[in-house]
Image (tube, rainbow, N blue to C red):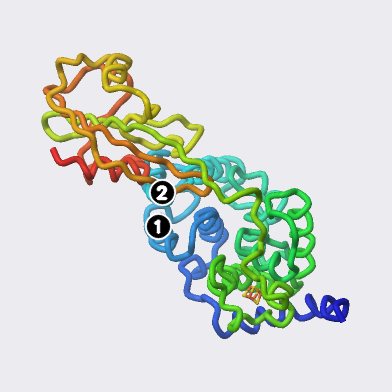
Amino acid sequence: MAEAYHSQAHVGFAARLLAWWDEHGRKDLPWQHPRTPYRVWVSEIMLQQTQVTTVIPYFRRFMTRFPDVHSLAGSDLDEVLHYWSGLGYYARARNLHRAALLVADELGGVLPETPNALQELPGVGRSTAAAIAAQAYGIRAPILDGNVKRVLARQHRLPGPVSSSKTQKELWRLAERHTPRDRVADYTQAIMDLGATICRRARPQCSLCPVRGSCQALATRDVERFPERAGGRNRRLERRRYFVLVEPAGRCLVERRPELGIWGGLWSPPEREANETLESFLAVAGIHRDLVDEVHAGAPFRHGFSHFDLAVEPVYVRLKAVPTAAHERGGRWIRPGEHALGLSAVAAKLIEANAW
Ligand code: SF4
């Protein structure tokens, strides 16, 4: 019985999914009209780690400013980061810009067609390459993003955390097996839609699911156990102190963050270790203590990342004059809402909360 059940699991999986998508799927997404390779590519990069509803307004603004690969390649990275501000995972924007330069300069402005060639572009991994190839060119290539992993892990009651190489290998094998020869673009969209709207991480809507008949996790009533998580559920907490320096005209100092690490290349009020004192910060920054007019601690808050939480401790420092040292070190003074720099979400929040 178990074998018969299992053998039915993939027969018709794609057909049932496509029939559901024909009736209920999302067909009005902005990157579907027109579904050009460039638009599909940008959308797939934005959709990595980010939900469709969040991406849509960013995608629209991005397309208005950078309608094709040449306009993206010809623009300044700072401006690209500005249009990405708030979307998170900024390495994506830097890689997209680098890849656009490569496509414009070395490939005549034409995005490669095959998954292997697409994977040569910065920021394009195996699943993203497959999603672009399938949707832009109709090439049969299995995808395996977070949504698809969840659907397949539940369909097959796959043991082991999805981060383990053994489970990854098995997931790719299953993804390959389920991907149909025909209508691959629609299937790719359909399985992503299923994961995003029905087979959700919490409280999946199994009663509405078109592939519930073959779902092994549903059959054993332990859907939410899959995909299994690695280790415990404790999240790492990192504390950081942010010094928000405010000059007499109300502008705040920002500095460019290192390329590597969170918010790489974006601008932010100076971020330091949580035990950094104002005195040592000023001394290292070359700002004389006599320039300080008033100091107050801002309300601390947390910002969540996929693997850890950042505890933000703001220190607001009003200055009597603009210190020259800040400029010498590449800092810039900006006013809330009056800038065209890529700011992290935390940086924007800190600057907007400035009451001086
Ligand atoms: S039946 Fe439920 S758990 Fe199984 S694939 Fe469908 S939504 Fe996901």
**Position above or below: 348 against 217:** above
* Quarter where residue 273 is shown: top left
| Left or right: where 255 falls relative to 310 | left
Mark 1 — residue?
A: 58
Say left or right for 131 vs 26: right
**What number of labels is visible?**
2
Name which residue lies at 79% across and 67% down: 177
Vertical order, 184 against 260 (above or below): below
Residue 255 placement (x, y as % from top left): 33, 29
Question: What crowding class fits label 2: few (fewer than 14 Cα within 10 Å), some (14-19), or many (20 or more)?
Answer: many
Dividing the image into four equal quarters, which quarter contains ligand 1? bottom right
Disc 2: which residue: 84
Residue 12 percent across, percent down from the top left = 76, 81
Badges 2 and 1: C-beta atoms under 8 Å apart? yes
Helix, strand or loop under label 2:
helix
The answer to whether 250 is drawn above or below residue 156 in the figure is above
Mark-to-mark CA distance, 2 and 1: 7 Å
